Amino acid sequence: TEGQTITCKAAVAWEAGKDLTIEDIEVAPPKAHEVRVQIYYTGVCHTDAYTLSGKDPEGAFPIVLGHEGAGIVESVGEGVTNVKKGDNVVCLYTPECKECKFCKSGKTNLCGKIRATQGKGVMPDGTSRFKCKGKELLHFMGTSTFSQYTVVADISVVAITDKAPMDRTCLLGCGITTGYGAAVISAGNGGIEKGSNVAVFGAGCVGLSVIQGAVKNGAAKIIVVDVNDAKKEWSTKFGATDFVNPKELKEGETIQERLVEMTDGGCDYTFDCTGNVHVMRSALEACHKGWGESIIIGVAAAGQEISTRPFQLVTGRRWKGCAFGGVKGRTQLPGLVDDYMNGKLKVDEFITHRQPLSGINTAFHDMHSGDCIRCVVDM
Ligand code: NAD
Ligand code: AHE
Ligand code: ZN
């Protein structure tokens, strides 16, 4: 297959708001500094649904969605040195070139090298490797894992041990790494400090992963806020100490007031894992005066804005956010896989649903039901 176009199955999003359709697509060979990966498993993340909905200002169609994938390198283009044919890999929607201003800053995991073309749905040279029925398909988040074969930039892929099961490692491509990294890397000055009081808004894959990171760093209280009571049991299983359903507050009481009361003045760290801008405000205002920090992880639709009284910041609360948990994919992801293999990082526990590629629309529908943490699609 090396050097040749491969015809394979992929789930194609032809237009916003419509179900995906399984199609035979043509995947061109990798050009210089590109890698063609056979995807074995992919998770389905809320961000895929968000872009499919049409609310993503960067979303364009037709497109091959998916960004939580693991597979094996089928072939590499000229000049690729970081991976080789046969390597087990995880795709990285946050690439790491190690040479741009961002990568060298030591201040962020965001990489600037290919962000512009990635946002336009094309490879770094401005073209697509996918075709279907004579039409070009766009790439998504530099990964497009809803295809049996995909082409990614070499900086958008990392080799990991072949001992780790790919139906688990795919989830390290987004949800788990995002929440865990937010707690152990992005929060504060390199992670939550021991003894901190933490509130996690939204206990999906991301929120539960924040809990996992907060436990690892020795947080004191870990309070979960979720409108779905079924998430109480899930949160406890991951190590949360308290659960509050904001639908069950006292009359006139706000969730931020409740959290401030529960923590003797406010939380040291709060995390938005819902994508709801009103929740983001509550999360900021639930922070401790003088130092409490709120980290936005949730993705809100185009046109949505956050607000609070500036006084909240004047009096020392801080607002920030992160992508992919602040994790540098090529440098740090293999370590997370090792942690998983050594029993130090929960991954299996997140998988509640499974589907074959033909059932990918069911995976999207399941995701919107309250009992799905992650659905893994067997490609
Ligand atoms: P999810 O839907 O599985 O979890 C969200 C949880 O929030 C659910 O349990 C839901 O009941 C709860 N919730 C909804 N409205 C609420 C409210 N008003 N108050 C309290 N809880 C509420 O989603 P997920 O997969 O965990 O993803 C969470 C968010 O993070 C999404 O917006 C997703 O797009 C985003 N995300 C961001 C990144 C990043 O790098 N920044 C990475 C992955 C996902
Ligand atoms: N195109 C979207 C951006 C959405 C967004 O913020 N994506 C996150 C990852 S979500 C993973 O599930 C991200 O990586 N952001 C940093 C970046 O460079 O995109 C929009 O809303 O415009
Ligand atoms: Zn995601």
Image: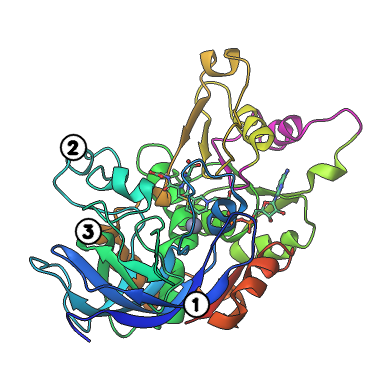
Query: Which of the two marks, 1 or 3, is nearer to us in this view?
Result: 1
Q: Residues within 10 Å of mark 2 (few under 14, many from 20)?
A: some
The part of the chain drawn in magenta is: 251-275
Left or right: 314 in relation to 172 = right
Left or right: 84 in relation to 205 = left
Q: Going by the picture, which residue comes out furthest to the left?
A: 79
3D distance between C-alphas at marks 1 and 3: 28 Å
Q: Residue at x 31, y 60 (%)?
A: 128
Q: Is residue 274 visible?
A: yes
Front one among 263 and 208: 208
The numbered mark at residue 101 is 2
Task: State which tag comes first along the sequence, 2 or 3.
Answer: 2
- Say whether mark 2 is within 8 Å of ligand 2: no
Front one among 145 and 267: 145
Judged from the image, the secondary structure of the residue bearing numbered disc 2 is: helix
Query: Which of the two marks, 1 or 2, is nearer to us in this view?
Result: 1
Q: Is the residue 11 above or below the residue 299 in the image?
A: below
- Say whether mark 1 is within 8 Å of ligand 3: no
- Kind of residue sitting beneath label 1: Glu
The numbered mark at residue 155 is 3
- Kind of residue sitting beneath label 3: Ile
Residue 310: horizontal and vertical position, in percent? Answer: 57, 14
Judged from the image, the secondary structure of the residue bearing numbered disc 1 is: strand
Left or right: 115 in relation to 365 = left
- Kind of residue sitting beneath label 2: Lys
Left or right: 55 in relation to 346 = right
Query: Would you say residue 274 sits in the magenta stretch?
Result: yes
Q: Quadrant of the N terminus?
A: bottom left
Task: State which tag comes first along the sequence, 1 or 2.
Answer: 1
3D distance between C-alphas at marks 2 and 3: 15 Å
Residue 314: horizontal and vertical position, in percent? Answer: 52, 13
Q: Going by the picture, which residue comes out furthest to the right?
A: 251
